[in-house]
Amino acid sequence: MCGIAGEIRFDSTPADTGALGRMLEVLAPRGPDGSGIVARGAVAFGHRRLKIIDLSEKAAQPMTDPDLGLTLTFNGCIYNYPELRAELEAKGYRFFSTGDTEVILKAYHAWGAECVERFHGMFAFAIHERDSGAVVLARDRFGIKPLYYAGVGKGVRFASSLPALIAAGSVDTEIDRDALHHYMSFHAVVPPPRTILRGVRKLPPATVRRYAPDGSFADRVYWAPPYERRAEDAGLSAEDWRDRVLASLRTAVKRRMVADVPVGVLLSGGVDSSVIVGLLAEEGQKDLMTFSIGFEEANGEKGDEFVYSDLIAETFSTDHHKIFVPSADLMDALPATVHAMSEPMVSYDNIGFFLLSREVAKHIKVVQSGQGADEVFAGYHWYPPLAASNDVVSDYAKVFFDRSHEVLKTQLAPEWIAETDASRTFVARHLLASGAATPVDRALRLDSQVMLVDDPVKRVDNMTMAWGLEARVPFLDHELVELAATIPPEFKLAGGGKGVLKEAARLVVPSAVIDRKKGYFPVPQLKYISGPYLDMVRDVLGSEPARARGLFRPEWLETLYADPAAHITPLRGSELWQAALLEMWLQSHRI
């Protein structure tokens, strides 16, 4: 929901509303229903609106409450806003609108920055305190809603997308070598605060930052659940955990139905999205819209999972929309897909979500989606081997990293190599931190708090918001995740992964969807690059801007061109696509 931007000056000069306007132009697809700017001296906020809750102009943003002396620009949705509003009204607060935006303003006044701990939802927001001159930035627990920032002289700008900050001007666009290391090694995951550009950073999830008028700031991390067992849970059976998970997931799905417009589901045909459809049907949802997408097969690999999405649609009598994308259409949509990325993202899913969102946005404005289940309930293939690990850092790197630091030295040009093994250093620090009981717990914590944020979650936000579509992710309900973190790993690893979730799903959806081989969002043309796709990536990597940048060793690229299908990463990605996608993104944004 929406796009936000702003500038904060620390030198007593007025904020640059021209730069703010340029940021809002870039953010227009995120909020096609309205635009606004509020400027007061050193602080200016901007907003692009997607109307989901309180469709009236009373809920327009940026929102100011002159009695409280607060101004807010907000992106996201607070699902429990009706309950919070009732609590605030009991404290004497009076409301002029009916949505969740004003609830944030009042909640901040009532409880200070700690109000974020009361919010169930996804959010990124900025609040300006008129009396103190301070500005507070905040991001939800999983970073579902993005928040980028860049220092500009004696000030800082922030926005919902990195390209918006570039459009505003005066940003250092030199490539960050450590971030490049992460992109090439940590499967394109660039952890906060870094981005691929040296001059742009992102606020970490579950963080509140307070800027004083002189530019000094302090951060507070407000959520970090323990991945450990609780004494009171000792002796719980698989069935006990199954029932707890199902009850919590049912609540999470129900919470995400709050809207003044219809809510649909992105239905891949996997267990995660299927159980969301089943639980919505349980709730009595009629004429529920569901949407699936498929692509042409390549190299003998099928490009759709319609057999499973059709089964769910028929079982629950949904209003189902099935989209098939011919190869020519896929090629045509690639430039726009890359341009919609806030940061370079290598997953093939991007094009699928982009084209699916384009179709869905013709019908509705809000969908639920199944992202997060694999990271929360141990659905990926790299978790079972970690159960017996005596060296979780090495064992995790072996199954997740695209390449080692030593191999990377043979692929990147020498001037672009980070001085140290930045990716392994980061991963080791996170994996070995206290608060996780087993190697599997450590990997799940890393994946749910870092990888998930800057791969699947960012992908879904970028591709849906490119079409003014809001995606809600019930598997990232923080209470559900807190519960899952306490479950002994053996219950999650059972059944080939996601065991406890699969058993919960059996009570809701047909077993045929559960007892299948794990599927992905297949786009085989981008995995087994050949024909026109090979011509395209050769043109990109051989272009004048790419040669001038000189990121990659030419001999490595020639090896990839000779046989792209022979160079697949441990996570089933194409090395050639990884290199080409980065260069395509840089050129798309004229960097």
Image (cartoon, rainbow, N blue to C red):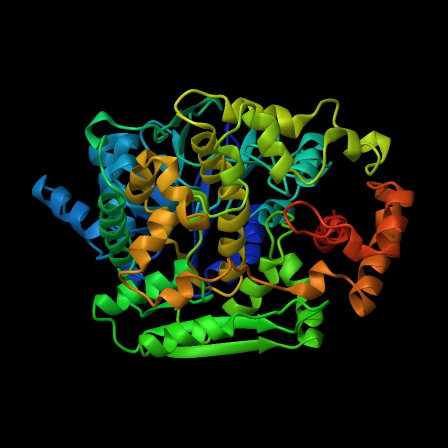
Q: Is residue 299 left or right of residue 492?
A: right
* Residue 204 visible in the snapshot: yes
Q: Nearer the viewer, residue 455 or 359?
A: 455
Q: Nearer the viewer, residue 358 or 492?
A: 492
- Residue at screen point 42% across, 61% down: 515
User: Picture coordinates of residue 130 (x, y %)?
Assistant: 33, 34
Q: Quadrant of residue 524?
A: bottom right
Please, is residue 278 above or below residue 109 in the view? Answer: below
User: Picture coordinates of residue 426 (x, y %)?
Assistant: 59, 26
Count of numbered labels shown in the rendering:
0
Q: Quadrant of residue 415?
A: top right
Please, is residue 416 above or below residue 330 in the view? Answer: above
User: Picture coordinates of residue 75 (x, y %)?
Assistant: 40, 50
Q: Nearer the viewer, residue 496 or 201?
A: 496
Q: Is residue 134 left or right of residue 105?
A: right
- Residue at screen point 36% across, 54% down: 502
User: Picture coordinates of residue 124 (x, y %)?
Assistant: 41, 44
Q: Quadrant of the N terminus?
A: bottom left
* Residue 68 visible in the snapshot: no
Q: Is residue 244 left or right of residue 356?
A: left
- Residue at screen point 23% across, 46% down: 244
Q: Nearer the viewer, residue 271 or 475?
A: 271
Q: Is residue 41 left or right of residue 484?
A: right
- Residue at screen point 27% across, 59% down: 58
